[in-house]
Amino acid sequence: MSKKVFVSGCYDLLHSGHVEFFRQAAEYGDLYVGIGSDATILEYKHHKTVYSEQERLFMVKSIRYVKEAYINQGSGILDFLPTLDIVKPDILVVNSDGGSEEKRQVCEKRGIQYVVLQRDPHEGLTARSSTDLKKTESQIPTRLDLAGTWIDQPYVSQYAPGWAITISLEPNFEIRERCGLSTSTRNVIKRIWPYQLPNMNSETLARLVFCFENHPEREDGIISGAQDSIGICVPGLCRHWYNNHFWPEKIETCNDEAVLAWLENHLVMIPMDPRRPGCSVVEGKDITEQKVKALARAAESCWNAIIARNLIDFAAAYKASFEAQLAMFPAMLNDAVQEIIDKWSVVPGVLAWKMPGAGGGGYLACVVDDAAAFATKYPEAIRLTIRRSGL
């Protein structure tokens, strides 16, 4: 009787390296494959899959070296344990960069042979990895401003200092132009580093991007706010303090996993039409000390609520910050945007809303009671993945 061989992985961007791994593993016996679920990959790797678990299951099952495949029902790095109980393999095969002491101990405890294969390409083919394939598309992050928007302009902070709060987002959804997600700054970055940010101090990187974008001979004469470069380049949750200068006096970050995961579970974005060409959101602006102080207070409250993971206070401060923006820049809002707000603000589960960036269109960024449940019920809603430090 042929031995049972088991392997496990994500197999999201299925490539020749995976097929060669299956071929080599199948030389030991009948090959069974465990596939990481969508939920596990989102939790463990902090990004959505390119292909759903059912698509990945179909593709893996279609490979001739594979006898059977399953969606793993566990979680984390050992998500395949329930599948092991189903298959009861004789051998567990891992790649040289996919092995671990935990996996070896699992095999020892269950009497399973543990085999490590080198990651070698099939004869005549180029070595492939999912990581390298992803680098063929730009992995430059984007950013979402949560509160204090406009305080990064000196003509606002001259009336009162305050914080701007941003989160750096993984680019795992379509990032459309003129939609409030700092695509102009992101496009500037891509002129220097087309595919990914360099591995360097994030605050220094943000300052370099800010200076490159706002060079002395910039044709339009407009200075892009520093919250754009900081929001993109500094991972996690970040707040930056502005006091009548273009660059903040201080920058503070939070990379607490509990806080970031909590935020991800309470934020979604609803796509709208992009801001119209020629639309001036600063037309008719009315900036006063009272209004700027209201913006600053809302941002301070927003940060405190997020750190405390207080959903009710977060929603209230988030909404107050947006209202403070609109009081100073009423042109951020137009009839088309108001229709979207009127529609989504009454949807059960929506607690607060705002437009990213300068407004005028793009997305409606909503605070919700449960992002996973909300996105399941409303497929147009985009869930967000905050870029972690060191990833």
Image: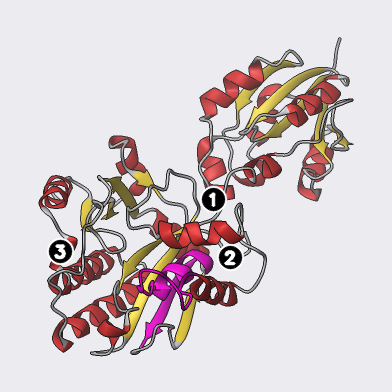
Q: Nearer the viewer, residue 222 or 311?
A: 222
* CA gap, disc 2 and disc 1: 12 Å
Residue 229 point in image, percent of width and height: 47, 69
Q: Residues within 10 Å of mark 1 (few under 14, many from 20)?
A: some
Image-quadrant location for residue 264 = bottom left
Q: Which residue is mark 3?
A: 331
Vertical position of residue 362 compared to residue 94: above or below: below
Q: Upstream in the sequence, badge 2 or badge 1?
A: 1
| Amino acid type, mark 3 | Ala
Q: Secondary structure at mark 3?
A: helix
The answer to if 249 sits in the magenta stretch is no
Q: Nearer the viewer, residue 103 or 183?
A: 183
Q: Which mark is residue 46?
A: 1
Range of residues picked out in magenta: 213-242
Q: Residue at x 30, y 43 (%)?
A: 374
* CA gap, disc 3 and disc 2: 36 Å
141 relative position to 244: left or right: right
389 relative position to 364: left or right: right
Vertical position of residue 386 compared to residue 163: above or below: above
Q: Upstream in the sequence, badge 1 or badge 3?
A: 1
Is residue 110 something that shows in the picture? yes
Image-quadrant location for residue 15 = top right
Q: Residues within 10 Å of mark 2 (few under 14, many from 20)?
A: some
The answer to if 233 sits in the magenta stretch is yes
